Amino acid sequence: TIYEKTQAFARFGGPIQFASNALSTLKAIDEKLFARVMDAFTFTGTRRCGIKDGLRSNGEFRMSKVADPKFLIDKNTPSDWFVSFPLKECADFFQLPYTGVVNRPDLQEILLDECRALKDDFIQNGV
């Protein structure tokens, strides 16, 4: 049994990211829990991910789609992407779920439900 000082858990916090390897580990441990997390999940690994500069020093906002090395010699070539992370390609190669996020309160609720399913008084609040 876990004893929690607060009277009740409050919904707060932002998204928590699960990388492909964490998701595949979760699935290997508990497929039911994995499915519940997936129901609340937003995939980000299917999009282009990396480090990008969207706001230029001159105040111009630009979002180019690809990195072009010509920016090194041509000042008119966009250089928004500093580096790109091949999350989708790596997940596909290793046959893993795609990286993404789940809202912290949703994840907390799922985990609390799963704990209570193991033992009704698994968590005692207000103690």
Image: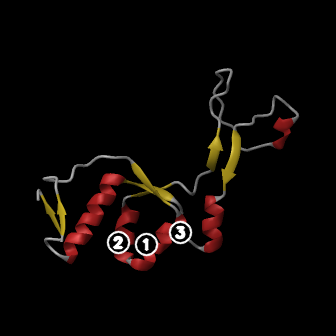
Q: Nearer the viewer, mark 2 or mark 3?
A: 3
Query: Can the viewer see residue 116 in this picture?
Result: yes
* Circle 1: residue type: Leu
Side (left or right) of 116 relative to 99: left
Of callouts 2 and 1, the N-terminal one? 1
Can you identify the residue that label 1 sits on?
A: 26
Can residue 65 be seen here? The reply is: no
Q: Which residue is mark 3?
A: 21
In three-dimensional space, the C-alpha distance between marks 1 and 3, rounded to whole angstroms, equals 9 Å
Query: Where is the C terminus found, in terms of image quarters?
Result: bottom left
Q: Is tag 2's residue or tag 3's residue first in the polypeptide sequence? A: 3
Give the residue displayed 22% in from the left and 49% down from the top.
Answer: 10
85 horizontally vs 34: left or right: right
Mark 2: give few (<14), some (14-19) or many (20+) Cα within 10 Å: some
Give me the C-alpha separation between circle 2 and circle 3: 16 Å
Query: In percent of the image, x 68 and y 50: which residue is there?
Result: 84
Dot 2 and dot 1 residues touching (CB under 8 Å):
yes
Give residue 116's position: percent from left, percent from top. Answer: 19, 70
Q: Quadrant of the N terminus?
A: bottom left
> Label 3 amino acid?
Asn
Identified at 26% across, 60% down, the residue is: 109
In the figure, residue 68 lies in which quadrant? top right
Which amino acid type is marked by label 2? Leu
Q: Are marks 2 and 3 in contact (CB under 8 Å)?
A: no
Q: Position of residue 38 (x, y in %)?
A: 40, 64
| Drawn side of residue 95 relative to residue 117, left or right | right
Which residue is denoted by mark 2 in the rendering?
33
- Measured as percent of width and height from the top left, residue 36 is found at 34, 67
Label 2 residue SS: helix
